[in-house]
Each structure stands twice: as structure tokens, then as C-alpha cells.
Image: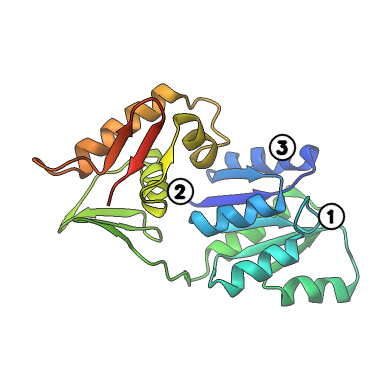
Amino acid sequence: MPKILVVEDERALSDVVVDYLSAQNYEVDLVEDGKEALDRLKFYSYDLVVLDWQLPNMEGPDICRSFRSAGGATPVIMLTGKREVDDKELGLDAGADDYLTKPFHMKELAARVRALLRRPAQVISKDLKARDISLDPATHKVMKGEKVLDILPKEFALLEFLMRHPNQVFSAEALIDRVWPTDSDSSPGAIRTYVNRLRNKIDSEGEASMIATVHGIGYRFDP
């Protein structure tokens, strides 16, 4: 299931976009702040980004430019009310792959999403490694030695986040906020469940767990 990041602070529009794309069987995350969007793109893997131009704290072209300069190759559709050719040129030169002027029909957005997702993947994602575990963000594959592990999507998202932040302690609430901020069903109890499932899959007998419990605080990934 392709994963899409929607970056839009106009709630009436973002609700429609998220609902429509979710109904098209995409996994959709929503953020409403420019700097938060750039942080997401640094730490998580997405198949496509729907990016508004005018955002709090950081505008769309600046986000796109920073993402591209860091090597990000995920397709980006820029949304904007700007209609001048010079503005479109600015957005595309910043690294956007497509440009959609507001107001637009959701069917057109969906068609452009499908067109970009049909392009050959160009993202070169560096594998994350710890002990005998390797995680490939591009293929969503986790291996223990030569064995491919059966990792559920939420488990994968949690493991990827922890592997990108080794030796840092996160409370259950912080993990919910950073890993699944749009999932209202997540809870500290759910975090415990996913941590235990991951331990059963990635840990080796006789070794300390890679996901340590810091009592009274939260969890720490120990590579």
C-alpha cells in the first residue's frame, strides 16, 4: 500500500484530501506545519508527498528544496493558489514534480498521484543495521541475518524510528506522537504490545534485548 504524506494547514481542504486518498487505498499521514513536514521527510519513508505552498514556519518550496538537497527523491505534488507562470517555475525549480492550482477536483489530484506513483522508484535508501538486523526503508523489508522477518506495518514504523534514534529514550506517548500521530487508536498499551512483538522477532536468545525498557520513562534502542 503506497504511503503518502499530505502537508496542508487548511483543515477544510486537508480533511477532504486525506479522506479521498484513504478511500483510494493509500496510507495517508497529515501534518500542518512546514518544519514538522521536513522532519518527517528526514526520518520516514514515503512514496509521495502532497505539499502545500503556504505553511506555518516553512513554505513548501523551501521544504522541497531542503529535501532535494539532502538527497530525497520522493515525488512531490505542490498545491498552491498561485497561478502565475513565474510562481509555477519557482515551485518546479525547487524540486516539485507536479503542480496543482487551487481550487482543484479531487479526481485530478488522484490522477496525478497515480501518474507519479507509476514512475520507476528513484529513492536510494540506506539500509539501517544493528547487530544482525537490517532494515530497508525503500522495500519495507527487515532481515535477521539471511532470514526475512514478518513485520507488520506499525511494527516496521516503530522499529525504523527506533533504529534511526539509537540510545535515545522515548516515552510511550512520545513514540505515539512521533511514529503514529494520526492514529487515534494508539495508546501506551499498544506501544507495549508492539515492543514485545518486535522483541520476539528481532532479539537473539541469550542476548540483551535491542529494545531496552527504561523503567518509569520509556524505551531505548540499543544497537
Can I make out residue 46 in this image? no
Answer yes or no: do the residues labelled 2 and 1 have beta carbons within 8 Å? no
Q: Farthest residue in the right direction?
A: 84
Q: Quadrant of residue 72?
A: bottom right
First in sequence: mark 2 or mark 1?
Answer: 2
Q: Where does label 3 land, which residue? A: 15
Q: Position of residue 202 (x, y in %)?
A: 22, 44
Q: Is residue 210 above or below residue 130?
A: above
218 above or below 119? above
Q: Residue at x 25, y 44 (%)?
A: 210
Near-viewer residue (104 or 182): 182
**Which residue carries the number 2 mark?**
1
Kind of residue sitting beneath label 3: Asp
Say few, some or many: other residues with alpha carbon within 10 Å of mark 3 (under 14 / 14 to 19 / 20 or more): few
Q: Residue at x 29, y 40 (%)?
A: 211
**Tag 3's secondary structure?**
helix
Residue at the spot of label 1? 102
Q: Relative to 77, is 89 on the left or the right?
A: right
Question: How far is mark 1 from mark 3, CA to CA?
Answer: 15 Å
